[in-house]
Image: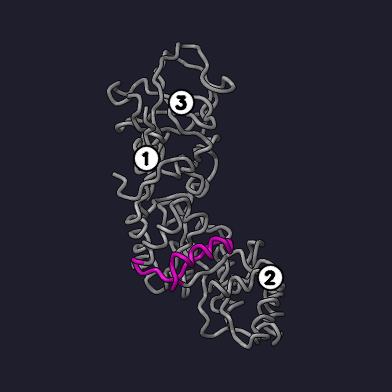
Amino acid sequence: MSETPMNAYSSALYGGRLTVDLDAIAANWSVLRSRLAPGSECAATIKANAYGTGQAETATRLFEEGCRTFFVAVPTEAIALRQTLPSATIYALDGLFPDTADLLLQHDVRPVLGSLDELKEWAELCRTSGKSFPAAVHVDTGIHRLGLSGDEFGTALADPELMGPFKPSLLMSHLACGSDPDHPMNKEQLDRFIALTSPFKGVPRSLANSAGVLMGPDYHFELVRPGISLYGGRAFDHGDNPMQPVAKVEARIMIVRNVPKGDAIGYGATQTAKRTLRNAVVAAGYADGLLRRASSSDDRPGGFGMIGGHKAPILGRISMDMITLDVTDIPEHLVQRGGLVEMLGPNVAAADMAAYAETIDYEYLTSLGRRFERIYGPLG
């Protein structure tokens, strides 16, 4: 018997598929650039594999759309992106790791300097080489993570050994409470940012992530750097989301079976059938980024999937490789072995599933589809 090559089976080998619509990502970027922040350069934050959508594919599409500045987190992401986009401006948000300056320069990556130690190292590099290598300077306006404090920034300004050897290519800070546009800390950070950066003339500034873009032009300055909004996620905790979905996750039905009334379902026997049920077991679980915290029990409802326009609630615990769905009220012809269930997409918003999992859509999107077939095209 001859051996059949794996690629002959195509998508049948996968427990599910992740479809990414690059045109939708580009459309979201265009809305942010042209309608929401028309007076600023619109960069793109593509860290964490472009929020799970694929760094190389997403960056290429956004560059084609006109995006020229990109933000990633760590040097490995930046160096990989440089291979994809030889002429783009690339910033590494996590700053200057020890012993990495030469490599960043080799790949034309700009670190976001967030401490006096990083600033001193970069300044010394510029001084000894006689060149002003571009880098951003991050000032902390209240989130107390990365960034120079107000006092440290004042020290840097007064010390010609620190700010003399180079001129920052960007001054930036980060909002702590942007997802709540009415939080008073947003205005406090805005005022601090203006006060700290006012001594610099002609240096672009950036405060706005996705939430900052939506909060209006006071927060935009010369450059905005949206992230979650590019990928269809919700920047604000409440209200309408002006972005369109960009990804769809579908899981394959393995078996359909009956569960007698009173029987328990799944690990831990956390949910009991209140009636005779028909359930579908699908080949996806928390190993695929469908978070266990979205499980259902007798005490709380969990997330859901969609089959042919019908909601299929999760039954019991989400396990590593499987999820059980209640399909009792869905027409039988729609629930067949080998069929696909939408677990995220136009009909199952990431923000809704994240709410069931007591988290945010950022975590959902960046975790998805490790074992799924990945397709780039319309969501259908």
Quarter of the view holding residue 307: top left
Q: Distance between the residues labelled 1 and 2?
A: 50 Å
At numbered mark 1, what does the secondary structure look like: helix, strand or loop? helix
At numbered mark 3, what does the secondary structure look like: helix, strand or loop? strand
Q: Quadrant of the C terminus?
A: top left
Residue at image mark 3: 324
Disc 1 versus disc 2: nearer the observer = 1
Disc 3 versus disc 1: nearer the observer = 1
Magenta part of the chain: 64-88
Q: How far apart are marks 2 and 3 (CA)?
A: 49 Å
The location of residue 205, given as percent across then percent down, is: 52, 75
Which label sits on residue 115?
2
- Labels 2 and 3: the sequence-earlier one: 2
Residue at image mark 1: 7
Query: Is mark 3 in CB contact (under 8 Å) with mark 1?
Result: no
- Observer-nearest residue: 7 or 91? 7
Q: Is residue 377 above or below residue 141?
A: above
Residue drawn at (36%, 37%) of the image: 11
Asked if the stretch drawn in magenta spans residue 102, the answer is: no
Q: What residue type is labelled 2?
A: Ser
